[in-house]
Amino acid sequence: MATPAEPDTAIAGEQLDTLVMVLNLVRSGAATTRPEVGRQSGLGRTVVTQRVLQLIERGLVIDDELGPSTGGRAPRRLRFRAEAGIILAVEFGATSLAAGITNLAGRLLQHREEPWDIGAGPEASLSRVEELFDAMLAADQAYAGKLWGIGVGLPGPVEFASGKPVAPPIMPGWHSYPVRERLSTRYGVSVWVDNEVNTMALGEFRAGLGQKIRDLIYVKIGTGIGAGLISDGRLHRGAQGCAGDIGHVAIVDDSSVICRCGNVGCLEALAGGAAIARDANLAAAEGKSPALAALRAAGQSIDARDVARAAESGDLACIELLTRAGQRIGEMLATLVNFYNPSLIIIGGGVAASGERLLTAIRKAVYRRSLPLATRDLQIAFSPLDDRAGLMGAGFMVTDELFSRERLGSWIDRGSPAGERPAR
């Protein structure tokens, strides 16, 4: 006979601690039956039964089909109800935006992407996001009343505690803009804002190549360059939320190489997408690349993907451009590898579409400049999730916050966090 649930009063203290522990084991898939929950958590059978029953009563977990028997009666599997709510997610890049809806397990239910200039400013940018969100919510009546939160990724430094961008180099007008407050007021739910590379790292860690890897670096090579750090299974944001901003680390002492941040010699100014396009246009103008010169003569703009296509066709100038960019990025990553010792480096972003030549150059530089022990088991690979990583990671960011000890107790007795605003 099942042990009855404890009285339905406000959940706090040790009861909340154990409830969060059980919920996280079930929703992560680490434990799928009550006996597994007990073994993984170290909690006694009675406490496990009580906590599971509380989660079932509140609609977060259900009993599913029977699991395999280990000699006695087959246990009933537990399943996290990922369909209980939805998360709105948006990821801004320098030249694009993607918006989507995920379930509570990070699975994308809808996804829309379009070109967008982040320099248009926060008012125009967030107005467009709201239009996309509204269209997606209206597309399926099943979403009505199920919105639990919103996750936002921005291409610049973000103070995570406040959800405000802080002096972002490529985002004029965004400094200290109240992104969280605007969207929270508009949709009546909690909102979290982070650097887009952090959400990408989280997406890869939870649903991509980084699953079950405790220490990894996600590197986005787009118009700019940034890194998201997963350390011992946790996203490392740093004291103010700006950890991993490797694009603005100086790699040369050359006053002629001026970065958009105002400093000189930054990695981004030498190996980012805008830098590759700049150097490619120069190669075309000087006649060093027949393929790029033909594009220039036809009036076409040249970007890193054009360089990649020309390199695959054997254009020597383009091969040199990609090799040099990859070498510079790899040398910077070698410093991180020696310092941080990850098991995996994932390369993503628009310039990652440049293909194997770029990846090969990065690998060679990392292995050449890093300590042998640090690279003994190191993998360096392209992102399998590509442009979905940021949206999925934004969804995970929201659910991780909602199901944290600090947040869960404030809303679980209502059954839903709708209307629960972030603490100021």
Image: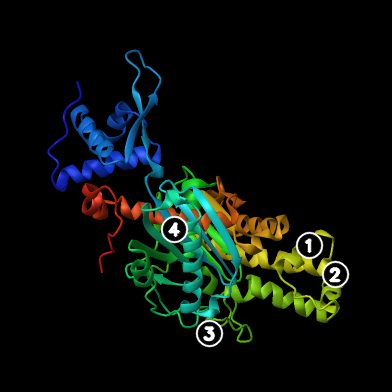
Q: What's the CA distance linking mark 2 and mark 4?
A: 42 Å
Residue drawn at x 46%, y 42% as measured from the top left:
212
- Inspect this view and state whether residue 374 appears: no
For badge 3, the amino acid type reads Gly
Identify residue type, mark 1.
Arg
Quadrant housing residue 51 = top left
Disc 2 + disc 1, Cβ < 8 Å: yes
Give coordinates of residue 144: x percent, y percent: 40, 53
For marks 1 and 4, give the one nearer the viewer: 4
**Element type where label 1 sits in the image:** helix
Q: Residue furthest bottom?
A: 255
Q: In this view, does 98 lie above or below 301?
A: above
Given residues 66 and 271, the one toward you in this image is 66
How many badges with numbers are in the image? 4
Depth order, front residue of 309/122: 122
Residue at which label 3 appears? 262
Q: Which residue is drawn at 86% across and 74% down?
A: 294
Circle 1 is placed at which residue position?
A: 309
* Residue 222 x, y percent position in the rendering: 61, 67
User: Which residue was labeled with disc 2?
Assistant: 291
- Secondary element under disc 3, as helix, strand or loop, is loop
Marks 3 and 2, Cα distance to the nearest angstrom? 33 Å
Q: In the rendered structure, are the residues bearing label 3 and label 2 in contact, judged by CB atoms less than 8 Å apart?
A: no
In the rendered structure, which amino acid carries the disc numbered 2? Answer: Ala
> Can you say whether 226 is above or below 260 in the image?
above
Q: Label 1: how many residues lie within 10 Å, few (<14), some (14-19) or many (20+)?
A: some
Mark found first going from the N terminus, 3 or 2 = 3
Q: Distance between the residues labelled 1 and 3?
A: 32 Å
Disc 1 to disc 4: CB gap under 8 Å: no
Q: Is 374 situated left or right of 421 in this image?
A: right
